Image (cartoon, grey):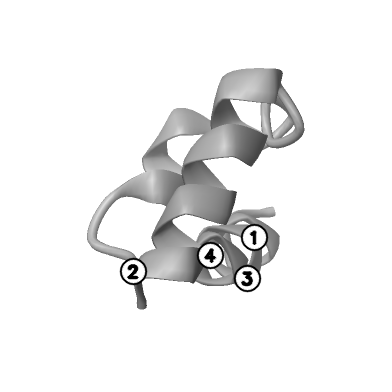
Amino acid sequence: PLDDTIRSFEEIADGKWDHLPEQAFMYVGAIEQAEEQARKME
């Protein structure tokens, strides 16, 4: 919920997830879902 959203935003803003392709962020909720999506795209 809100805590996860704030944490994810801070991590994205800090560049923690810059290694993931932009497409991995489409249609996902939590940042962990984007990470999983990126693995599927490999």
Mark 4 lies on a secondary structure that is helix
Q: Amino acid at mark 1?
A: Glu
Locate residue 17: give its quadrant. top right
Q: Are marks 1 and 3 in contact (CB under 8 Å)?
A: yes
Q: Is residue 1 toward the left or the right of residue 24 in the image?
A: left
Which-is-in-front pick, marks 4 and 2? 2
Check whether the beta carbons of the residues at disc 1 and disc 2 lie within 8 A of each other: no
For the residues labelled 1 and 3, the Cα–Cα distance comes to 4 Å
Q: Residue at x 58, y 35 (%)?
A: 10
Residue at x-position 48% and y-position 67%? 3
Q: Amino acid at mark 3?
A: Glu
Circle 4/circle 1 CB separation < 8 Å: yes
Mark 3 surroundings: few (<14), some (14-19) or many (≥20) residues within 10 A:
some
> Do the CB atoms of the residues marked 3 and 4 lie less than 8 Å apart?
yes
Q: Dot 2 corresponds to which residue?
A: 29
Q: Disc 2, disc 3: CB below 8 Å?
A: no
Q: CA distance from mark 4 to mark 2?
A: 11 Å
Which marked residue is nearer to the observer: mark 4 or mark 1?
1
Find disc 4 in the rendering and name its residue: 37
Residue 26's spot in the image, x, y percent? 28, 50
Inspect the image, locate mark 2, and give the three-letter code of the amino acid beneath it: Gly
User: Of tags 1 and 2, which is closer to the observer?
Assistant: 2
In the rendered structure, which amino acid carries the disc numbered 4?
Answer: Gln
Q: Which mark is first along the chain, 3 or 2?
A: 2
Q: Secondary structure at mark 1?
A: helix
Label 4: how many Cα within 10 Å (few below 14, some 14–19, many 20+):
some
SS type, badge 3: helix
Label 2 sits on a secondary structure element that is loop
Residue named by callout 3: 36
Judged left or right of residue 22, residue 2 is: left
Q: How far apart are the alpha carbons under marks 1 and 2?
A: 11 Å
> Which circle's residue, 4 or 2, is located before the other in the chain?
2
